Image: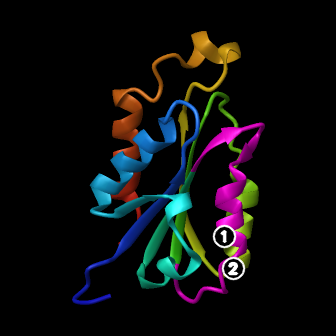
Amino acid sequence: STIGVMKTLVVYSSKHHMNTEKTALAIGAELGADVKKVDGVHSGDLDVYDLVGFGSGINGFTVHPELTDLVAGLPERKRQRAFVFSTCASNKDWTGKLRMQLAAKGFDVVGEFHCPGLWTPLFLKVRKGHPDSIDVESARAFARGLPH
């Protein structure tokens, strides 16, 4: 990177209620990052970035396969940092496999953020209206706390 300016990319997969997109855009705005849906990103696109965020809605207790497929297709990284974020109807963190996958590729995983999100009628009452303005501000605060 030039003159101490860190170049950041936020890659996300958001399928149902676009909760992850809302979170990705908040984090991206805070970081001055490029924000792209995963289906518009190719493995070589990541090479010019110092920090890459990987975000996904959680469906079936897992990160969207298109995101893990992108990571699986990446060549080994050197000195590239990453963070993960997710939206999920449960309070559990389902990004462990993704973080391990990133570490195995050589990424230095420097942060993780999880936010409530509505995805099934089962959780309608619990997560209705999330991510809300407080969740979005939490995402922004998370972004401000990332090393840069």
The answer to whether any part of residue 5 appears in the image is yes
The vertical placement of 111 against 88, above or below, is below
| 78 or 75, nearer to the observer | 75
Q: Is residue 111 visible?
A: no
Q: For residue 48, which quarter of the picture?
A: bottom left
Q: Is residue 37 left or right of residue 29?
A: right
- Mark pair 2, 1: CA separation: 8 Å
Q: Which of marks 1 and 2 precedes in the sequence?
A: 1
Instruction: Locate residue 29, reporting x and y percent.
Output: 28, 53
Q: Residue furthest front?
A: 40
Is residue 1 toward the left or the right of residue 142 in the image?
Answer: left
Residue count near mark 2 (Cα–Cα under 10 Å), binned few <14, some 14–19, many ≥20: some
Q: Residue furthest top?
A: 125
| Image position of 80 with respect to 9: above or below | below
Q: Nearer the viewer, residue 43 or 109?
A: 43
Is 106 on the left or on the right of 145, as rendered?
Answer: right
Q: At numbered mark 2, what does the secondary structure look like: helix, strand or loop?
A: loop
Q: Check residue 105 in the rendering and tell me which mark sits there, or answer none.
A: 2
Is the C-beta separation of discs 2 and 1 under 8 Å? Answer: yes
Mark 1 neighbour density, 10 Å: few (under 14) some (14–19) many (20 or more): some
Q: Nearer the viewer, residue 139 or 28?
A: 28
Q: x%, y% of residue 65?
A: 72, 54
Over which residues does the magenta segment extend? Answer: 56-80
Name the residue: 43% across, 49% down: 24
Q: Secondary structure at mark 1?
A: helix
- The circle drawn on residue 71 is 1
Residue positioned 73% across, 68% down in the render: 101
Instruction: Look at the image and say whether residue 128 sits in the magenta stretch.
Output: no
* Closer to viewer: mark 2 or mark 1: 1
The quadrant of the rendering that contains the C terminus is: bottom left
Q: Amino acid at mark 1?
A: Val
Quadrant (top left, top right, bottom left, bottom right) of the N terminus: bottom left
